Amino acid sequence: MSNEGNRERLIGTVSFHLSAQNAPCPICGRHSRHFASEYPSNEALFRALVVLWCEQCGSGWVPDAGRMTADYYATDYLAITPQRKAPPAEVFAEQSLAKDKRFARAMAQKRAIERHGAAFDTVYDFGFGLGFFLFATAAPKKFGFDIDPQTLRFAEFLSIKTAAPWEMPVASIDCLLSSHSMEHIAAEHLDRHISAFYAMLKPRGLFAVEVPHAALSWLEKPGIHRPHTIFFSAEGLQCSLVRHGFTILERGFAEDGPAAGLSKCAIYAPRSTDAFYSSRNSSALFIICMK
Ligand SMILES: [Zn+2]
């Protein structure tokens, strides 16, 4: 690991000051006091950003992030995703797949969705990356979107038709995944994305979402948060789905991660009666919901 990576891991605590009274939260949709903090990164580009936090759901977001990320993925992002330069045939060779953790995660996600009776005829992956999930489902009709242009070679290799969520026909998809992607959406565009996810699913179609558990409003979670533009709490993620019409079928964490510490300057308190909201599991949040 680079020195920069070591320094980055030290950041776990953010401090807050009151920023706005009674404004709508782009994640949970409720009116709330907003608190501002520094961005939890040592990298200058990010350190200069402000993060706003919702007192109601504990989630955070970078305001006006669309401008910040406009060029980022075409330039800087490539430097931290070198594995995407590999030839697709090499990545999908049997011996490579057998030891690839990302493929193992895609298989685990597929099995989890399968337990709810998913059909895998027409599948969409938002942020498909190298296409592991679409490959794992063996869907005859594969669709997806990824902001990183490097992924287009993998789309071609796996016959993935690329389309933005709002370009998909209404009620055309059996099953939709968004794994470690929604935290990269500019918060001002989150509603548009979740509405489009809902619209493209067939009735009773399934949506599985996995995002980092980033409720730094009450947890200390050292690690690399850049270039995330949304910091989901469990409550915020659930609210964002429910208020767009989804029915929650399963909620939990990708793994049994170590417990995150409590922030000494918390501005949010999860309802202790809800074990999902109040869990300090530092692994990723995982929800399966239904249209
Ligand atoms: Zn909120």
Image: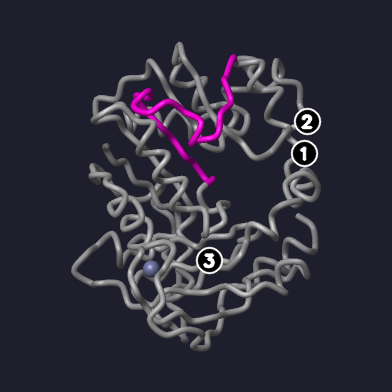
Q: Distance between the residues labelled 1 and 3?
A: 27 Å
The answer to which of marks 2 and 3 sits earlier in the sequence is: 3
Q: Does the CB distance between marks 2 and 1 fall below 8 Å?
A: yes
Residue sitting farthest toward the left: 273
Percent x, y of residue 67: 69, 59
Mark 2: which amino acid?
Lys
Query: Which residue is located at x 40 percent, y 63 percent?
Result: 233
From the image, tell me which residue sits under label 3.
Answer: 61
Percent x, y of residue 275: 24, 62
The answer to which of marks 1 and 3 sits earlier in the sequence is: 3
Query: Which residue is located at x 58 percent, y 60 percent?
Result: 229
Disc 3: CA contacts within 10 A as few (<14), some (14-19) or many (>=20): many
Of residue 95 and residue 203, the one placed in the foreground of this image is 203
Query: Which residue is located at x 38 percent, y 81 percent?
Result: 22
Mark 3: which amino acid?
Trp
The magenta stretch is 159-181
Q: Is residue 214 above or below residue 203?
A: below
Residue 34, quarter of the rendered image: bottom left
Find ligand 1 in the image and state its quadrant. Answer: bottom left
Image quarter hosting the C terminus? top left
Relative horizontal placement of residue 117, taking residue 237 as reference (left or right)? left
Count of numbered badges drawn on the protein:
3
Residue 7, quarter of the rendered image: bottom right
Of residue 251 and residue 19, the one placed in the foreground of this image is 19
Mark 1: which amino acid?
Pro
From the image, tell me which residue sits under label 2.
Answer: 85
From the image, tell me which residue sits under label 1.
Answer: 82
Q: Is residue 39 above or below residue 160?
A: below
Image depth: mark 2 or mark 3 in front: 3
Relative horizontal placement of residue 115, taking residue 201 as reference (left or right)? left
Percent x, y of residue 11: 63, 73
In reply to whether residue 250 is colored magenta, the answer given is no
